[in-house]
Image: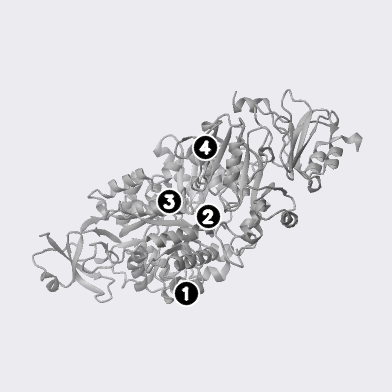
Amino acid sequence: MTATTIYRARRVLTMNPSRPEATHVAVQGDRILGVGDLDELAGWGEYTLDERFAGHVLMPGLVEGHSHTMEGTFWRYVYCGYFDRTDPDGTTWPGLASIDAIVARLREAGERLGDGPIAGWSLDPIYYGERRVSRHDLDAASTERPIGVLHASGHIMNVNSKALELAGLLRSGINHEGVPLGDDGLPTGELKGPDAMMPVGAHVGFDRDVLACDELGLRQFARLCVRQGVTTATDLASLLPDDGVDMMLRVTGEESFPARIVPLRRFQGLTPEAYIERALELRVRSTDRLRLGRVKIVADGSIQGFSARLRWPGYYNGKPNGLWYVAPEHLREIYARALERGVQVHTHTNGDEATELVLDCVAGALVQHPRPDHRFTLQHCQLASAAQFRRIKALGMCVNLFPNHHFFWGEQHYATTVGPERATRMNACATALANGVPMAIHSDAPVTPLGPLFTAWCAVNRRTATGRVLGADERISVDTALRTITLGAAYTLHMDHEIGSIEVGKKADFAVLEADPTTVAPEELKDIPVWGTVHGGRVFEAAGI
Amino acid sequence: MGHRARRACVRSGRNLNDVSTPAGYPVTVIGGYLGAGKTTLVNHLLRAANGRRLAVLVNEFGDLAIDASLIEADDGDMISIAGGCICCSYGSDLMAALMELPQRLPDMDAVIVEASGVALPGGIVSALTLLPEYVLDAVVVLADAETIRTRASDRYLADTIRRQLTDADLILLNKMDLVGSAALQELRDWLGAEVPHARVVAASHANVPPQTLLGIGASSRVQAGDGTHFEADGFMTLSFNPDARFDLDALGEALAAPDSGVIRAKGFLLNVAGELCTLHVVGSRFAVSSAPNGAAPAFVCIGMSGVLEVEHVNELLAGPGAA
């Protein structure tokens, strides 16, 4: 018989409404044998009492429903963000308060790294006033070596003169919306959108192949998961070629790999029919720590990039409507085939018109191929109205909202993109829940940092980066937020029967916390230190990972 | 001799409206919504390549059923096609595909980019300006004669369809066999009101002479004037060998004006200073650049029969003295 370990904790927050809290949890193998007090659990027979969490609070392992394992890849570049951020080694990189500070860090990194290009990431110029970052700024870090710094959004890159020169772009006569020109008629060094970034990318070290998550990136990502109390995280999404899947199966299959990864297959390069067949092909290769078989479609662009599809009255600053990234016919066909074959579809929609199109298409496909409990999920779905949430509920769909976005870019949305009213109700968690919509919340790491407790803090407080509360009526309670980053996210992945709460029969996945999230002030939710995780009964301490 | 040699001997001159000069690989962008006939057109152009080496970039092979009879080798994301053409899929990364293309087919004569059904061709045009290896030849947008007006008022697609049409130099009004000739004028009028600057070419099964859609410039083997004479139902060409001097900007503007009925025009003419120049007209855009060494005055205009204003064009090409 497999040995039983009973962990004593300061408190066990189970997320199981019939037994919301306990003091002990018994683990046998990778599963939870029981939750209760020691007397209740002792009835299962011989056990070892493990006291190491006696001073800690156990929660179900946190579930990140929308991240990219690429966050693990990015840490090999120079962190240039405005906010403090912790890397996979546990080093916290201080946020950079000025452009000078960014230049200094790039210069220092250049000296440390030796020759070659200098690549940075997570720049967010909105925090440095009106002035745009230019190639001249970055030239102060080096004129000899190409430098490229990707913005936090991932849609823009700033480069120095050397990088422009190597890409053949340090010339006059360029006429491209994504390449602003200076008074001298030459590019300023700001490159907006993938087309503008592409010619420079390889010269500054952002190769296409590097941006796809590689083995090292996947390992680093898993270490970040431990530091943030995450035991299950999605990779949303990639092309999942066979060799990539082989690598992920090998790495996640190692006994020491500390997370469960759920990679979704992006819609690209295949007909809708072949796409769904591919998902089914992948599904049978699933293991406990690599869950394959789900797919993700991108319907529109981003709100801050003005490429999201908005309903009337459109963008607050009058920009034309955004772009469709998929044809409605393809959406309809994919939904119909997926419902017929039982493949779960996640769809990225940022604008409310994109959400509306998806709802229309799903409604039509459900008439063709009714399937109970399909849980098709809208990812981001940032601008959904109350009526749309009611329809989402009626269609049996889920949402995964993006409160982190509200913190980082809420003020921009208020002033520029969608205006005060819609910025105030963006990522309307309270409305979604009031209408009974199954809901998750996410980080979209590396766009914003992986860290469900921070995401929960964003949803609970709805503060923007300037500190003001934007949309007080859409705030949710701490208890609700904690449920959302565990069971809520698990539900959107059809995994709530095995993860997301601490109860008998489920995976022994715990987030081990240094403080009790239900008793700290809601403003301090994000500051709760994470000791580490238990994943399938295996203990991972952040300090030793 | 490859591409570099051609660039070296052909110095680019004034480039008024970013129409193709012989300074790079000419690119034809093919846009239009799903079902408008882009795949049919690509197959047609490949079949009629006639010795020209075309590089075709498609969004997805998934959407492109290349005639099996054309395929010589299939190499994952690149298909080799009889006659020296290739077809590559670019997925979400057109820029990378364009950057790799010159290594894959260094002596290509023309590039065809098939946009996805929801893409705006204008976005591809501006992306091309970042790659000095390429010059835009034309944006051809297909419109399904049967459905275009419904689509153009669709709740979700209206603005996308209209922006696609607006980006076009040439609108290929396809599937005319499904609507009959009575509808042609009605559709022409509608398009004329929607997209006043675009030239409309009517067709069935995307069957139009390749000369109307592809650049005829930057090839070492195909000289201007050569290969532009063709016989095809519904089309006509006008050829000239004028030795007069022209105000080429004024001539370009006149040929690019809607009342000329010219779809394309290209050739070598003397400017007012007596220098031989290339004048290139695609739809409503034109460009003047210096002519290649060894060229002689010659000029060709292409239009649809009944639409091309023969007398007007003849007058324009007769030179200033004859007006």
State the image coordinates of residue A261 (x, y, percent, origin top left): 32, 54
Give the SS element for disc 1. Answer: helix
State the image coordinates of residue A145 (x, y, percent, origin top left): 49, 36
The answer to which quarter of the image holds residue B182 is: bottom right
Instruction: Please report, as a chain letter, where disc 2 is located.
Output: A
The answer as to whether the residues below labels 3 and 2 share one chain is: yes
Which numbered disc, 4 or 1, marks the residue closer to the eye? 4
Q: Is residue A272 above or below residue A468?
A: above
The answer as to whether the residues below labels 2 and 1 share one chain is: yes
Q: CA distance from mark 2 to mark 1?
A: 25 Å
| Residue topped by disc 2 | A325
Judge by depth and name the residue closer to the eye, A365 or A449.
Answer: A365
Q: Is residue B309 left or right of residue A139?
A: right
Residue B90, label in figure: none
Which numbered disc, 4 or 3, marks the residue closer to the eye? 4
Q: Earlier in the sequence, mark 2 or mark 1?
A: 2
| Residue topped by disc 4 | B69
